[in-house]
Image: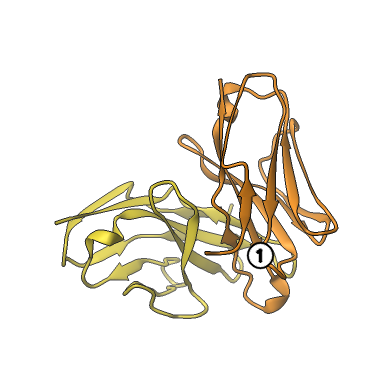
Chain colours: A orange, B yellow
Amino acid sequence: DSGVTQTPKHLITATGQRVTLRCSPRSGDLSVYWYQQSLDQGLQFLIQYYNGEERAKGNILERFSAQQFPDLHSELNLSSLELGDSALYFCASSNPSGGADTQYFGPGTRLTVL
Amino acid sequence: AQRVTQPEKLLSVFKGAPVELKCNYSYSGSPELFWYVQYSRQRLQLLLRHISRESIKGFTADLNKGETSFHLKKPFAQEEDSAMYYCALRLGSGNTGKLIFGQGTTLQVKP
């Protein structure tokens, strides 16, 4: 068990709605990353936070936003949902100060947009 | 542009046969490469990091900078090795970084 937790496990919602995905990193990890896994796009990096600050941005839509809180948990907000947003959303965490920056993944949140 | 290529979408072998999952990368800097395994769309689990040169579950991978490759090998495949394997390249330095993943290779080990 990598220690990264994500809630909820599954989410079913309708187009146009807004959802929030939550991630708690491993104890001691300051970095949180969000990835989207879909059948057509594969695994895509969305965004990284380090100790509350945004550090890197990938192919994240403007309808999506994220933040990392003082307790280091992170939330990914997806709004104006479209059918194409249906995917598995993974959170990962790491401790860059430990030398090798290995990312450990959570179990994911499966989002279905109907 | 930085890119990770896994040319095989599916690799099917018989139990006991050798396995080689190919990974090529494109990156001008000093690469940090990883192999992750995903069983039945569960979480990605770290399998190997090139810097540690370790062997996990009998798998090894050697970074070949000349050929820009990081192929994953196992001498004798087991049925429980059946899974999706992703090669990943870390971009960034210090506290900033992201993983670029290949498209993944499904390994199917037949009895």
Give the amino acid at mark 1.
Arg
Picture quadrant where residue B60 is located: bottom left
Q: Nearer the viewer, residue B11 or A77?
A: A77
Q: Is residue A105 left or right of residue B41?
A: right
Q: Please identify the quadrant where the C terminus of chain B is shown.
A: bottom left
The total number of labels drawn is 1
Q: Is residue A78 left or right of residue B54?
A: right
Identify the chain of the residue marked 1, using the numbered disc in the image: A
Q: Position of residue B4 (x, y in %)?
A: 49, 55
Q: Position of residue A9 (x, y in %)?
A: 57, 42
Q: Which residue is identified by label 1?
A: A26
In the displayed structure, B104 sits above or below A19; it is: below
Q: Is residue A49 left or right of residue B71?
A: right
In the displayed structure, A101 sits above or below A15; it is: below
Picture quadrant where residue A101 is located: bottom right
Q: Position of residue B46 (x, y in %)?
A: 49, 65
In the displayed structure, A98 sits above or below A114; it is: below
Residue found at x 66% / y 41%: A59
Secondary structure beneath disc 1? loop
Q: Position of residue A46 (x, y in %)?
A: 66, 45
Residue found at x 56% / y 64%: A2
Q: Nearer the viewer, residue A17 or B51?
A: A17
Residue found at x 25% / y 64%: B19
Residues packed near mark 1 inside 10 Å, few (<14), some (14 to 19) or many (20 plus): many
Residue found at x 23% / y 64%: B78
